Image (cartoon, rainbow, N blue to C red):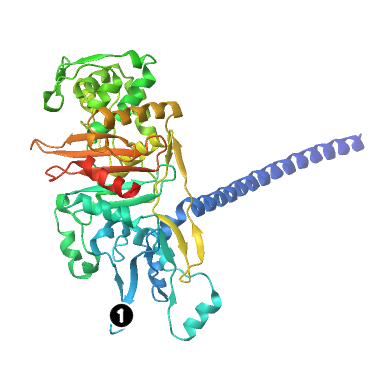
């Protein structure tokens, strides 16, 4: 009897011990899984940081560790795509280093300033203060008390196009930016008012004091925000053909202005009555009556999704620190907001580089490329250390949709508001735009386009701020395209 009781107690004890052991194992497993999970999260973040964030952190103007490199390394040169030197480090009679910009104002915004780490000077700050990694050479220089020479940065900028854009913009406020639509390579970038970077030491504080409308430090090509005017009809037309399969049969009679009950009167330019128009004719004529009216046929929530897929309301992620474009229209918007937005007025704002990306995606069969201005990094001896390749940002529309919108842009040149580009050695396509911005009666002049129409090699965006003199934005674009093709 006693033996049975002891066996029973032992059995219960074994079961209890087994249960406790199981609990301990389970707790150990949970803790192990937690640490494994934390390790994987840290490893994942390390990969994410290395791939996506490292460059921005390293080149951040507030990263003081980079300043230490300047004590050991002579800052490298910045060059155009053909090797033309755009910025270099020189020494004065007392062996003090200073940054020299051979072309003065012409490249001031795209190259930027070393002292403020703007433009390429800021974007490639780390590369310019790095060497090719030859340890023996670096040790030898250090033993001699000499600095090593930093790497050079070669940009995508084409000097011939840069000069053409700079000259064509003249004394106007505004911007010109051009790129290869198939790659995203920036070929030219000009913004005015401008400044001579060679005078930065003496004049920088004065430049900072300028009113925002006259700021010479603002790179309008990237950081300027404007109402897009009729260039926005590219997206209004795209949403219309998506919403209505019979869009080619749609017709509207323009009487010179359009009024919708509860809304506002939208006039065409000079209140011109365009008569009965289809979509292609209205696009070529840039008919405000037509486009403000078809806004009520659009599915507004889908329209907002389309615009955001093209980059509105988000960081463009170009690495060029571009301003964020805004689009506010949705199903809750008022009648007036619908009318105004569909012709590129209202609350919609866009930067020139973003407008360029939109038209470039149309030129590139619906594929939007990521714009870039640094082509490669090379040692002082010319050995290539790093090459930046084209990157697809997103596919924003189908090839058929892009082809149709491109045909509308071609009609603007052949039969519409851009006759300056009609008789050229190349076939261009594009969209003009006039954007009101206050009650002064002045307006910004826009042109976005590409050429050749059937096989685009270059896309361009021009903005002339209100009060401009001389020719319109179309003629500025023509001067740059002429330089490219001739």
Outermost residue to the left: 440
User: Where is residue 337 shown, x and y percent of the image?
Assistant: 21, 25
Left or right of 395 in this view: 337: left
**106 lies left or right of 303:** left
> Is residue 232 visible to the viewer in this orientation of the structure?
no
Residue 377, image x, y percentages? 46, 62
- For mark 1, does the 10 Å Cα neighbourhood hold few (<14), some (14 to 19), or many (20 or more) residues? few
Residue 18 lies in quadrant? top right
Where 78 falls versus 261 (above or below)?
Answer: below
Residue 167 horizontal/vertical position (percent): 22, 53
**Residue at the image position 45 percent from the left and 71 percent from the top:** 380
* In this rendering, position of residue 13 left or right of residue 240: right
Say if 272 sits above or below 152 in the image.
above
Residue at x 50%, y 77% (from the top left corner)? 138
Location of residue 146 (image quadrant) = bottom left
Q: Nearer the viewer, residue 7 or 285?
A: 285
Quarter assignment of residue 425: top left
């Amino acid at each position: 009897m006693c033996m049975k009781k002891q066996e029973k107690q032992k059995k219960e004890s074994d079961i209890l011990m087994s249960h406790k052991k199981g609990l301990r194992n389970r707790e150990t497993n949970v803790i192990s899984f937690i640490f494994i999970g934390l390790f994987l999260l840290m490893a994942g973040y390390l990969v994410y940081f290395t791939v996506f964030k490292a460059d921005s952190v390293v080149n951040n103007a507030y990263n003081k560790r980079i300043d230490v490199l300047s004590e050991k390394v002579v800052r490298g040169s910045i060059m155009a795509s053909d090797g033309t030197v755009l910025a270099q480090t020189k020494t004065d009679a007392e062996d003090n280093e200073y940054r020299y910009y051979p072309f003065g104002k012409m490249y001031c915004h795209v190259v930027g300033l070393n002292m403020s780490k703007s433009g390429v000077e800021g974007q490639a700050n780390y590369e310019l203060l790095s060497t090719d990694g030859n340890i023996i050479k670096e040790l030898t220089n250090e033993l001699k008390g000499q600095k090593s020479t930093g790497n050079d940065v070669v940009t995508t900028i084409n000097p011939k196009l840069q000069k053409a854009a700079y000259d064509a913009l003249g004394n106007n406020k505004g911007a010109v930016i051009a790129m290869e639509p198939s790659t995203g390579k920036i070929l030219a970038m000009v913004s005015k008012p401008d400044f001579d970077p060679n005078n930065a030491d003496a004049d920088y504080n004065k430049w900072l004091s300028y009113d925002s409308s006259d700021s010479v430090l603002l790179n309008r090509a990237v950081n300027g925000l404007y109402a897009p005017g009729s260039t926005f009809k590219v997206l209004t037309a795209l949403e219309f053909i998506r919403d209505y399969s019979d869009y080619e049969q749609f017709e509207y009679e323009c009487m010179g202005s359009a009024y919708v009950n509860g809304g506002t009167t939208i006039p065409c330019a000079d209140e011109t009555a365009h008569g009965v128009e289809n979509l292609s004719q209205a696009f070529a004529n840039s008919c405000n009556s037509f486009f403000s009216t078809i806004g009520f046929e659009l599915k507004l929530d889908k329209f907002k999704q389309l615009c955001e897929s093209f980059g509105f309301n988000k960081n463009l992620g170009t690495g060029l620190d571009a301003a964020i474009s805004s689009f506010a229209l949705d199903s809750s918007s008022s009648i007036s907001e619908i009318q105004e937005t569909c012709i590129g007025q209202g609350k919609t704002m866009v930067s020139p580089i973003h407008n360029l990306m939109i038209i470039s995606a149309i030129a590139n069969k619906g594929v939007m490329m990521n714009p870039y201005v640094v082509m490669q990094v090379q040692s002082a001896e010319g050995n290539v250390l790093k090459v930046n390749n084209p990157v697809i940002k997103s596919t924003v529309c189908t090839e058929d949709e892009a082809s149709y919108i491109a045909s509308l842009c071609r009609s603007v040149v052949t039969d519409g508001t851009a006759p300056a580009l009609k008789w050229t050695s190349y076939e261009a396509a594009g969209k003009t735009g006039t954007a009101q911005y206050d009650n002064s009666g002045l307006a910004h002049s826009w042109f976005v386009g590409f050429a050749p129409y059937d096989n685009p090699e270059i896309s361009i965006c021009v903005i002339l701020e209100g009060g401009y003199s001389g020719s319109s934005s179309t003629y500025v674009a023509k001067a740059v395209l002429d330089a490219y093709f001739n």
